Image (cartoon, rainbow, N blue to C red):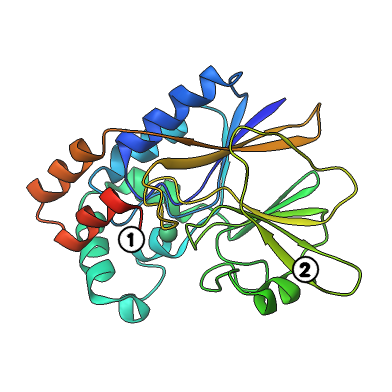
């Protein structure tokens, strides 16, 4: 069984479609796991939801998803994110809103815990520091935890002394998951922030007990054009060129 792992698609249909096509080239997948923030920032919230639902999937909610359906106040969003989120809310019909509202904050699937932020605080906490990672290891019972939210791809390990290591993935190289507790971020699919503008994702192969990160180019300018046409903030479209 192969699982396509995506996070922070952020209404970027071109990036999402490119990832699904690229995953097919890497052996395909049987189902998808989404780690939240399907919507927010980008120009195609409804189409992105529909594309996820075309395939078997499991999904947890992210802060942008919750805000778009009125389950989270925008007061903790920066003004640019809040503006994009308010626009997103107007683009969702009742049926799609209900779909987002039904997503849990945390899912356990076999030896994986799925959350958006961190297992301690799935809505807001970023697992980007050794301190946050060390705490996070105490908040999930499975072997591995999948997180998104920071839009940074990594594999995070803790050794017996409590030392934390964040490893940058080697793209296309399967990582043997056996016998190790890990926190894994597939990267920000629709709005990368690690300086690489390519869309990021991962594939888990349950037979091989291995996970590989991937990057794929997509038509950034097509997404940017749509964002400008919808008067979404320039900062949000421009950052897609740089992956920052
Ligand atoms: Zn996000």
**Residue at 77% across, 31% down:** 206
Specify the quarter for ligand 1: bottom left
Mark 1, residue position: 68
Disc 2 to disc 1, C-alpha distance: 30 Å
Mark 1 lies on a secondary structure that is helix
- Placement of the C terminus among the 4 image quadrants: bottom left
- Asked if the residues shown at circle 2 and circle 1 are in contact, with their CB atoms under 8 angstroms apart, the answer is no
- In the image, is 174 to the left or to the right of 44? right
Q: Residue 38, percent across and down?
A: 41, 49
Q: Residue 130, percent across and down?
A: 68, 74
Labels 2, 1: front one: 2
For residue 201, which numbered disc appears in the image?
Answer: none
For residue 137, which numbered disc appears in the image?
Answer: 2
Toward the viewer: 195 or 141? 195
**Residue at 57% across, 29% down:** 56
- In the image, is 2 to the left or to the right of 238? right
83 up-or-down from 35: above or below? below
- Placement of the N terminus among the 4 image quadrants: top right
Q: Residues within 10 Å of mark 2 (few under 14, many from 20)?
A: many
Q: Residues within 10 Å of mark 1 (few under 14, many from 20)?
A: many
Toward the viewer: 37 or 171? 171
To which quarter of the image does residue 126 belong?
Answer: bottom right
**Residue at 10% across, 50% down:** 228
Q: Earlier in the sequence, mark 2 or mark 1?
A: 1
- In the image, is 224 to the left or to the right of 175? left
């Amino acid at each position: 069984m192969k699982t396509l792992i995506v996070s922070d698609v952020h209404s970027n249909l071109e990036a999402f479609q490119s990832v699904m096509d690229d995953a097919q080239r890497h052996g395909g997948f049987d189902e998808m796991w989404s780690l939240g923030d399907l919507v927010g920032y980008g120009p195609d919230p409804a189409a992105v939801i529909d594309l996820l639902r075309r395939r078997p999937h499991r999904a947890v909610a992210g802060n942008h998803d919750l805000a778009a359906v009125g389950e989270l106040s925008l007061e903790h969003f920066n003004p640019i994110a809040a503006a994009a989120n308010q626009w997103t809310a107007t683009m969702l019909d009742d049926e799609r809103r209900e779909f987002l509202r039904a997503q849990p904050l945390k899912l356990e699937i076999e030896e994986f815990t799925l959350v958006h932020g961190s297992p301690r605080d799935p809505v807001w906490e970023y697992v980007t520091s050794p301190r946050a990672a060390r705490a996070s290891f105490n908040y999930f019972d499975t072997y591995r935890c999948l997180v998104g939210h920071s839009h940074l791809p990594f594999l995070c390990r803790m050794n017996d002394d409590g030392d934390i290591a964040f490893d940058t993935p080697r793209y296309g190289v399967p990582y043997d998951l056996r016998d190790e507790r890990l926190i894994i971020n597939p990267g920000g699919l629709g709005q990368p922030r690690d300086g690489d503008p390519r869309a990021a994702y991962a594939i888990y192969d349950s037979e091989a007990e291995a996970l590989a990160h991937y990057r794929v180019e997509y038509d950034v300018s097509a997404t940017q054009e749509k964002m400008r046409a919808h008067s979404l903030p320039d900062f949000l479209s421009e950052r897609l060129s740089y992956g920052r």
